[in-house]
Image (cartoon, helix red, strand yellow):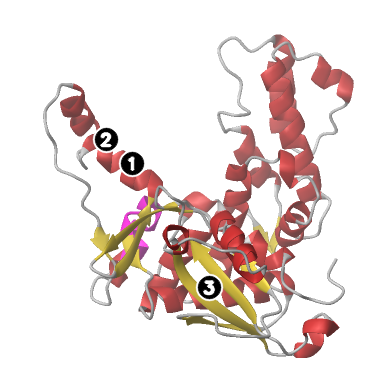
Amino acid sequence: MTGDFWLSSGHLLLDRTPEGRLEVTDDFLRAYLARPEIGPVEDSCASELALHRALLANPRLEVGAERLAALADPDARENYEVWLGFRDVLVSRDTLEEGYLALVRGGGAGRVPALFLDQLVQVILRTMLEGVGEPMRARAAELLFRSQRVNLQDGAVLVADEDTVDERSRDGGFGGLGRLLAENGTAVRGVDLDVMTEGNAGEYWARSDAFDMVLEVGFPKPGLDALCRVLEHWVRHLLGVVVRIHPVQQISDERWSWHVGLDTEATGIMNALYNGDEVDAERLARVLALFRLEFDDPGVMLERVAGRPVYMAMAMTADRKLRLKPQNLLVNLPIAGKG
């Protein structure tokens, strides 16, 4: 039994369709209005306060350009413009999944804060993982919406949540007391997080919103396999296409015809290798995992690559951060007629 998890995703604020998709509700939209980027501050003008009250009463309210222009703070005007555009994309679609796809396919994601997209990814994943009961998959799914710090230790590839590591680094794991000690020059212990194993994985559900378990994602560890299963499910849930993904140690394919980088760093490296450009050893060492993706039905693929595998990679940055872009799998796969 998993109980509930990722309460921070806001999944309880959304309705479900009979097909298991998510429907945007007014309460879900109101949650964004409570965020500091949107909520009024002490010196907010009367027009801003009135607009915020009106949107809380009706989060789907049409807001004209004149009303936005009446806001005294230019930053507030921009924040509302961005949020209203984001909202309009979501409410104009039948499901949250369709809204997310519209955003990442060019429907305004360029102006949407990455944080908002991450929140959509989290709540979609939360729905996908309902009843799965495998904590390692849930932890692996965190890679799709939370930045990770990478530790290469005795051949192991360990990833830990970046925000959690930063917070523990500041307070030594002792919260406000630790920060007070650090500010006064008193040494506190270093970052000490549990590495997920078969023995302690069950603890994940109770602490899921703490994002404080380390996952090993080296080849051929269970954490990497769990990530493959999450990525398969992600493609199936969003695109309705069945794929099989497996980690590989190298790409030795003279007919390499398609690839997808799961992050910005991996995309650059894969592009360079595909084009025959030289990639130095230091940059190649940033590649943490390679994958082979195959379609169950080659008939859904672009004709020129039908039946051929898609190679994928994930890589850390020079400062050892891993930031996956799950939208890459949705917009860059060689699917015929996708819109």
Where is mark 1, residue-wise? Answer: 166
Q: CA distance from mark 2 to mark 3?
A: 32 Å
Q: Is residue 99 above or below residue 245?
A: above
Kind of residue at badge 3:
Val
- Residue at image point 39% right, 73% down: 223
Kind of residue at badge 2:
Arg
Name the foreground residue: 271 vs 329.
271
Q: Which residues are magenta?
A: 204-213
Where is mark 2, residue-wise? Answer: 170
Name the foreground residue: 218 vs 242.
218
Query: Residue 205: within the magenta?
Result: yes
Name the foreground residue: 210 vs 219.
219
Crowding at dot 2, Cα within 10 Å, few <14 / some 14-19 / many 20+, comes out as: many
Q: Position of residue 37 (x, y in %)?
A: 60, 29
Q: Give the quadrant of residue 105.
A: bottom right
- Residue at image point 68% right, 10% down: 45
Label 1: which secondary element: helix
Q: Is residue 123 visible?
A: no
> Mark 3, mark 1: which one is toward the viewer?
1
Magenta stretch, main secondary structure class: helix
Q: Is residue 76 above or below residue 196?
A: above
Q: CA distance from mark 3 to mark 1?
A: 26 Å
The quarter of the image holding the N terminus is bottom left
Q: Is residue 105 above or below residue 28?
A: below
Where is mark 3, residue-wise? Answer: 230
